[in-house]
């Protein structure tokens, strides 16, 4: 799934994000400012989603989530990148994810929790946080866990599809998308753990030999 999404995503970066990134840098906008602005936008969109405006909220959150590609592109274009920018970006991503799924839970609670959607949303949120943690922790240990069928972009797209279905009047749409996402997120956790285990360097032989006469 990730590779299917990444192909058109590269085209978007080439034809849309890159010129926008250059323009913003030229007028003095920093990548960190874009990161924070995008997160604020997601928070606003999540509020409308919690209030039941699913279609508007989905489109608004999706538009704001595109800043995740924009700020990264801006950071790569700058001659001197700061480590704090990467930390800020990851922190804002976690905050945005919490807002989106929190809004979904609030909305479904008001609808009577159809098809157990609240449970699926909480599983998706928890597993999604673990997905991100496994990758970050593996990198800090010198391992590679950069794999998975449901990375952050895919998770947001699945929730977005569910939001559009729910906004179109299909009560089962959002819960169904959340259950699919919950399953894929759990699978991704194990995919990353297994891949990280396989990338761990094997112990090297000491080379000592028995030299006793």
Image (cartoon, grey):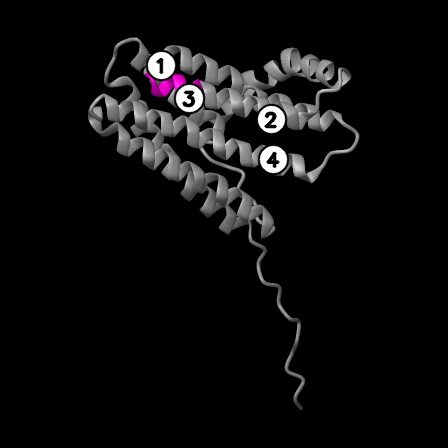
* Quarter-of-image position of residue 177: top left
Q: Separation of disc 3 and disc 2 at Cα?
A: 17 Å
User: Are discs 2 and 4 less than 8 Å apart at CB?
Assistant: yes
SS class, disc 1: helix
Q: Which residue is mark 4?
A: 88
Query: Which label belongs to residue 46?
Result: 3
- In screen coordinates, is 43 left or right of 174? right
Query: Is residue 22 visible from the viewing direction of this image?
Result: yes
Q: Which residue is mark 2?
A: 35
Q: Is residue 132 above or below residue 33?
A: below
Q: Earlier in the sequence, mark 2 or mark 1?
A: 2
Question: Residue 137 magenta-drawn?
Answer: no
Q: Separation of disc 1 and disc 3 at Cα?
A: 9 Å
Q: Earlier in the sequence, mark 3 or mark 2?
A: 2
Q: Separation of disc 4 and disc 1 at Cα?
A: 28 Å
Q: Earlier in the sequence, mark 1 or mark 3?
A: 3
Q: Which residues are magenta?
A: 45-51
Q: Earlier in the sequence, mark 4 or mark 3?
A: 3
Q: Is residue 150 above or below residue 25?
A: below
From the top left corner, tell me how far across and down residue 64 is, in percent: 53, 18
* Quarter-of-image position of residue 66: top right
Q: Which residue is mark 1?
A: 54
Q: Residue furthest top?
A: 168
From the top left corner, tell me how far across and down residue 145 is, in percent: 52, 43
Q: Separation of disc 4 and disc 3 at Cα?
A: 20 Å
Q: Which secondary structure class fits the magenta region best?
A: helix
SS class, disc 4: helix
Q: In which quadrant is the N terminus drawn?
A: top left
């Amino acid at each position: 799934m990730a590779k299917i999404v990444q192909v058109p995503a590269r085209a978007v970066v080439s034809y849309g994000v890159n010129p926008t990134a250059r323009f913003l840098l030229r007028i003095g906008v920093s990548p960190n400012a874009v990161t924070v602005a995008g997160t604020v936008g997601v928070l606003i969109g999540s509020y409308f989603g919690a209030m039941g405006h699913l279609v508007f909220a989905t489109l608004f959150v999706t538009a704001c989530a595109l800043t995740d590609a924009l700020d990264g592109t801006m950071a790569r274009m700058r001659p001197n990148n700061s480590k704090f920018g990467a930390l800020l970006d990851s922190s804002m991503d976690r905050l945005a994810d919490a807002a989106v799924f929190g809004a979904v839970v609030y909305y479904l609670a008001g609808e009577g929790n159809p098809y157990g959607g609240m449970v699926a949303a909480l599983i998706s949120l928890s597993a999604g946080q673990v997905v991100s943690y496994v990758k970050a922790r593996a990198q800090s240990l010198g391992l590679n866990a950069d794999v998975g069928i449901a990375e952050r972009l895919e998770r947001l797209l699945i929730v977005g599809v569910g939001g559009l279905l729910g906004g179109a009047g299909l009560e089962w749409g959002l819960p169904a998308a959340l259950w699919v996402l919950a399953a894929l997120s759990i699978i991704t956790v194990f995919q990353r753990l297994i891949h990280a285990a396989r990338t761990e360097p094997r112990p090297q032989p000491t080379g000592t030999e028995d030299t006793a006469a």
